[in-house]
Image (cartoon, grey):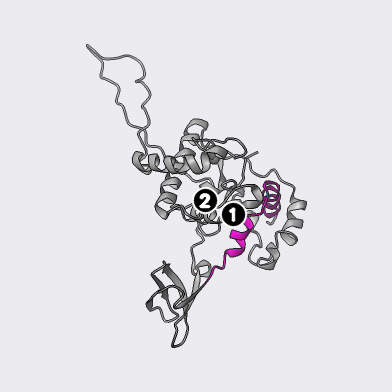
Amino acid sequence: MVPIKILASALCALTLSVTLSAQTPPAGGRGGGRGAAPAAAPRANPKFPADVVARGKESFGPSCGFCHGLDARGGDGGPDLARSLFVLGDENGQQLGELLKAGRPNNGMPAFPNMTPAQVKDMAVFLHERVEAARNREGTTPPNIVVGNAADGQKYFNGAGKCNTCHSVTADLQGIGGKMEPIALQDKFLSPRGGRGGGNGAAMAKKVTVTPKTGPAVSGTLMSVSDFAVTLRDASGDRRTFTRDGDEPKVVITDPLQAHLNLLRVITDKDIHDLTAYLVTLK
């Protein structure tokens, strides 16, 4: 059974290949060796620069090491993040950053609102490196994650989880269990924007409405936002940027996936397993 507390929880069999250095056996003759050449040692994966991993570990230790262990492999009260489905579904620290800002108070995880974007990205590299290191040691066979109760999952879907307020098993989710592998399916509801199978389409993009002190409000797809400016793409496809000064102009951001983000803070391991078991039956 896979431990899943989301950053304490999560999904997706993220495949990061390890390149092995080739070693050619010496030719026969004087000095020539007999038999198989020694096994080649794995090279450092260029996706995980040593300096970035070190910075990420340095940020991770004081903030998260007490619960998750300094090597992220589990500690006092915190799960092994090298097996975390949430970490697997993270992309460049985006999902990790959202979780760190909000925390999971119901699960005993505090928020870390003062962690900088650079620290979050470094920490994400460190955690993904931990995932890869664990995979190298333990093999690449995906675990069987269908261990929940499908009937309880159906109750959660239509009840406490409120999944049926946005989704329908006879419409957008019809046949989903036959279209996606269980591990990707689970990742999809835990990390819909960054998980396996994509999820970055226009329907999932954040929307924003900017209301200047004078003049009409402007709405569109959010491109970027900071304390100093907000950029959007309006309905005609034009890119527009507004300078911000405190609360002017008024900026309202709407995330169509906010319900999923809210779910991450309260969903339990049992709910995750049960919901996955139910969705797998939708074929």
Q: Residue furthest front?
A: 246
Farthest bottom residue in view? 215
What residue is disc 2 on? Answer: 89
Q: Position of residue 63 (x, y in %)?
A: 50, 44
Specify the quadrant of the image occupied by residue 169.
Answer: bottom right
Q: Please, what is the three-letter code of the amino acid marked with disc 2?
A: Gly
- Identify the amino acid type marked 1: Leu
Asked if the residue under mark 2 is in contact with the one under mark 1, i.e. CB atoms within 8 Å, the reply is yes
Secondary element under disc 1, as helix, strand or loop, is: helix
Q: Which residue is mark 1?
A: 190
Residue 184 position in % (x across, y down):
57, 51
Q: Is residue 115 left or right of residue 34?
A: right
Report whether residue 169 is seen: no
The residue stretch that appears in magenta: 253-281
Q: Earlier in the sequence, mark 1 or mark 2?
A: 2
As drawn, is 41 to the left or to the right of 280?
A: left
In this view, the residue in front, 228 or 99, is 228
